[in-house]
């Protein structure tokens, strides 16, 4: 489905109208497991609340989204692999809410706790704007055995016919 440009399906009765603000339709979205680079977290490094996801785009580590809130056990496990950045970091310590989630109505600044980049496996729906994930990611696990330098734009997010080298 993702390579056809279809994000998912909406399931509803034939005569069921759209009702703004109501969740009366069922949405079925295609999800994939991909690796991202965790370059920051929201919350303290010892108790992260959310992961700030990054990918290398145009030769730079860029913010491409955020995770859903981490459950306590997942936060504790991820914290084992987090450490402060060893040198200069490409991201600021504060960003607009829309930098993490383009649909975020809260334009207030969000404080980031910058970390030494670490690979993280996430579950993502395939809604990709070309520069960011449209919806929050679900953290599955840290991947400390992978080098962040080896994480590339996942195949499912590339336009048809493009390779990692393009």
Image (cartoon, rainbow, N blue to C red):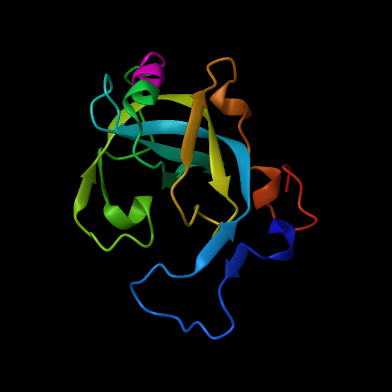
The residue depicted at 58 percent of the width and 59 percent of the height is 28
In this view, which residue lies farthest toward the right? 161
* Residue sticking out furthest to the left: 108
**Image position of 58 with respect to 48: above or below:** below
Instruction: Tell me if I can see residue 60 in this picture.
Output: no
- Image quarter hosting the N terminus: bottom right
Expressed as whole percent of the image width and height from the top left, the position of residue 80 reads: 38, 13
Q: Position of residue 127 (x, y in %)?
A: 56, 58
In this rendering, position of residue 3 left or right of residue 127: right
Q: Is residue 126 above or below residue 121?
A: below
Please, what is the dominant secondary structure of the magenta stretch? helix
Identify which residue is drawn at 36% across, 50% down: 100
| Residue located at (36% from left, 21% from top) | 73
7 sits left or right of 163 in the view: left
The region drawn magenta spans: 76-81
In the image, 126 versus 132, the foreground residue is 126
Q: Residue at x 35, y 33 (%)?
A: 70
- Name above or below for residue 97 compared with residue 75: below
Out of 73 and 26, give the one closest to the viewer: 26
Tag count: 0
Residue 162 image point, x, y percent? 76, 52
The quadrant holding residue 149 is top right
**Res. 1 in view:** yes
Q: Nearer the viewer, residue 82 or 127?
A: 127
Q: Is residue 15 above or below residue 82?
A: below
Left or right: 134 as drawn, with respect to 113: right
Would you identify the image quadrant in which residue 56 lies? top right
Residue 92, how many percent across, how many down?
29, 40
**Residue 13 placement: quadrant:** bottom right
């Amino acid at each position: 489905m993702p390579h056809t440009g279809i994000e998912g399906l909406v399931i509803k009765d034939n005569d069921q109208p759209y009702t703004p603000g109501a969740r009366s339709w069922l949405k079925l979205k295609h999800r994939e497991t991909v690796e991202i680079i965790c370059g920051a977290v929201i919350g303290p490094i010892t108790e992260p609340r959310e992961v700030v996801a990054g990918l290398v785009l145009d030769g730079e580590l860029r913010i491409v989204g955020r995770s859903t809130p981490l459950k306590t056990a997942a936060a504790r496990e991820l914290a084992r692999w987090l450490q402060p950045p060893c040198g200069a970091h490409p991201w600021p310590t504060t960003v607009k809410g829309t930098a993490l989630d383009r649909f975020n109505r809260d334009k207030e600044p969000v404080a980031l706790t910058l970390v030494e980049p670490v690979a993280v496996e996430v579950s993502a729906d395939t809604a990709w704007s070309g520069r960011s994930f449209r919806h929050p990611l679900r953290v599955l696990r840290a991947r400390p055995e992978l080098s962040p330098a080896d994480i590339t734009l996942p195949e499912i997010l590339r336009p048809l016919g493009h390779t990692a080298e393009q």
